[in-house]
Image: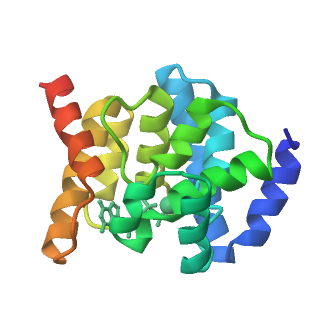
Amino acid sequence: LQSKQQIMDSVQQALSAKRWLHTTGVVSTAIELAQRYGANPDEAELAAIVHDVAKYWPTKQMEQTIREQQLDVDVLAYDKQLWHAPAGVFVAKSEYGITNEDILNAIRYHTTGRAHMSLLEKIIWVADYIEPGRSFPGVDNFRKQSKIDLDGTLLAGLEATIIFLQSKGKTVYPGTLAARDWLAEQVN
Ligand code: DGI
Ligand code: FE
Ligand code: FE
Ligand code: FE
């Protein structure tokens, strides 16, 4: 495993200044949520640092890596926006030496979520959604809710994301719908 500082330097190099600022926002938010909800803050920090590392890879490279490494091949049938998450898992393992499966899953599912998400996976999804740099209508309500109800925030965030994608005429990845349905069952 590389040192946290080495990993941070490497991720920063792979991203634009704006995207790195987003990442630092996810880091601070994820640590806060981990402390609040009893996850391991070091794991939350590391997952947050790495989560978008492959965001600027060329599409071909993401596609090839997902095929060769037999990552989540089914995402290739869906929007390219989903591909940086599994590609990031490859970087996490091969370049940074991360083996913690929960951290790898938090990176893998940070865009879509999934049914049976772990606490860490939930924290990274929510932190990505509400970090201080995000500015969509209603984000402040999500931030407030995240201080008292992680599952409720995740469910509301997934639902808002699904509605947003549908309003844009985009196909929603089945895993995203499965995450929403699973959580709705947990919460109600
Ligand atoms: O990488 P970020 O911008 O920090 O955020 P992200 O990884 O959560 O989302 C990346 C993009 O993926 C965002 O524009 C929303 C989109 N997205 C999330 N879930 C789905 C999706 N796009 C489609 N088509 N289907 C999904 O289920
Ligand atoms: Fe992302
Ligand atoms: Fe997200
Ligand atoms: Fe992100």
In the image, taking residue 7 as reference, residue 88 lies left or right, namely left
The answer to whether one can see residue 46 in this image is yes
| Whether residue 119 is situated above or below residue 25 in the rendered picture | above
Q: Position of residue 122 (x, y in %)?
A: 42, 36
Q: Residue at x 57, y 79 (%)?
A: 60
| Whether residue 2 is situated above or below residue 118 in the rendered picture | below
Which quadrant: the N terminus? top right
The answer to whether one can see residue 134 in this image is no
In the image, taking residue 121 as reference, residue 154 lies left or right, namely left
Foreground: 71 or 89? 71
- Residue 118 lies in what quarter of the image? top left
| Whether residue 104 is situated above or below residue 174 in the rendered picture | above
Foreground: 4 or 92? 92
User: Total number of numbered labels?
Assistant: 0
Q: Position of residue 68 (x, y in %)?
A: 61, 60
Q: Position of residue 169 (x, y in %)?
A: 16, 77
Foreground: 88 or 129? 88
- Residue 167 lies in what quarter of the image? bottom left
- Residue 115 lies in what quarter of the image? top left
Q: Identify the image's colour scheme: rainbow, by chain, secondary structure or one colour.
A: rainbow
Q: Residue at x 53, y 51 (%)?
A: 71
Q: Residue at x 11, y 25 (%)?
A: 188
Q: Residue at x 77, y 50 (%)?
A: 94
